[in-house]
Image (cartoon, rainbow, N blue to C red):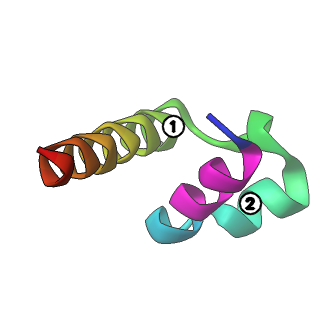
Amino acid sequence: MSEQLKMQLAQELGFAETVRQHGWGAVSTKDTGEMVRLAIAKAEQMMSGRR
């Protein structure tokens, strides 16, 4: 996953400022899990739209 995509997802989920100030290590496991779920959902949407 690109850094740009990770930051976009973090922005959507509301913890981008934490990443900017303290790095990815400061993000909770719960938030990173939500980020992965959102990334998967977006990928599935893109794939279903291409069929």
Q: Residue at x 32, y 38 (%)?
A: 37
Tag 2: amino acid: Thr
Residue name at image x 74 percent, y 69 percent: 17
Q: What kind of element bears circle 2?
A: helix
Q: Is residue 7 magenta?
A: yes
Nearest the viewer among 20 and 44 is: 44
Q: How many marks?
A: 2
x, y percentage for residue 23? 84, 46
* Residue at point 61%, 52% (across, down): 5
**Horizontal relation, residue 49 to residue 19: left or right:** left
Residue at 40%, 43% in the rendered image: 39
Q: Is residue 13 above or below residue 45?
A: below
Q: Position of residue 19 (x, y in %)?
A: 77, 54
Label 1, on which residue?
32
Alpha carbon separation for disc pair 2 and 1: 12 Å
**In the picture provided, is 35 more to the left or to the right than 16?**
left
Residue bearing the label numbered 2: 18
Taking the magenta stretch, the answer to whether it contains residue 43 is no
Q: Report whether 31 appears left or right of 8.
A: left
Residues in magenta?
A: 3-10
